[in-house]
Image (cartoon, helix red, strand yellow):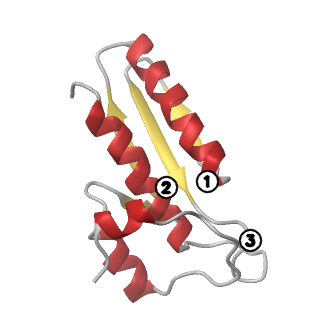
Amino acid sequence: MVTTADLLKKTCRHLDAGLNDAEIKEHLAAVDGWSLQDGKVAKTFSFKNYYETLAFVNAIAYVIHAEDHHPELVVTYNRCTVKFDTHSVNGGRGGISENDFICAAKVDAIYQQAAH
C-alpha cells in the first residue's frame, strides 16, 4: 500500500511505463482530494484572494522545477487547479505515472503549511 509519507520521500525520475488502473487507484488513496480528470491527476486549491493564490503558485514552482515534472495550472482569483500527467510514458503517448503522485503529495504538503 502506497502512503503519502512514501511519496514525500521520493523524487521524480524518468519513466517509460505508466501505472495501470489498479495502481492509479492505490496511489489516489494516498493523496487526499486528488482525482482523475480527463486523464490527469487533478485537485483544486482554494484561497482568500488573488495574492494568496499567486503565493501558492510561486511556492509550488520551486518544487515543480526541482522535480522537473511540470503540471498544467489553471489560476483564477481565489483558486488554483493543478493537473499532473506524464508525457514520456506509454511510448510517448502519455499517461499517469508515480511521478504525478510524488508531485501531488509535495504540492499538498506546501498547501498544508499555509494557514488553511
Vertical relation: 110 (above or below) 106? above
- Of residue 10 and residue 103, the one placed in the foreground of this image is 10
- Badge number at residue 67: 1
Find out whether the residues at labels 1 and 2 contact each other: C-beta distance under 8 Å.
yes
- State the quadrant of the C terminus: top left
Vertical relation: 113 (above or below) 102? above
Vertical relation: 44 (above or below) 21? above
- Of residue 29 and residue 13, the one placed in the foreground of this image is 13
Instruction: Using a 10 Å C-alpha cutoff, classify the residue at mark 3 as few (fewer than 14 neighbours), some (14 to 19) or many (20 or more).
Output: some
Q: Residue at 38% across / 88% down in the picture? A: 22
User: Could you say where residue 24 lies in the image, as x and y percent from the top left?
Assistant: 41, 78
- Of residue 8 and residue 33, the one placed in the foreground of this image is 8
Pick whichever of labels 1 and 2 is earlier in the sequence.
Answer: 1
Secondary structure state at the residue bearing disc 2: helix
The amino acid marked with disc number 3 is: Ser
Q: Residue at 34% across / 45% down in the picture? A: 109
Judged by depth in the image, the label closer to the viewer, 3 or 2, is 2
- Residue 4 seen: yes
Identity of the residue furthest to the right in this view:
92
Q: Which residue is mark 2?
A: 103
Pick whichever of labels 3 and 1 is earlier in the sequence.
Answer: 1
Q: Which residue is mark 3?
A: 88
Q: Residue at 55% across / 43% down in the picture? A: 63
User: Could you say where residue 61 lies in the image, as x and y percent from the top left?
Assistant: 58, 35
Identity of the residue furthest to the left in this view:
116
Q: Residue at 65% across / 43% down in the picture? A: 65
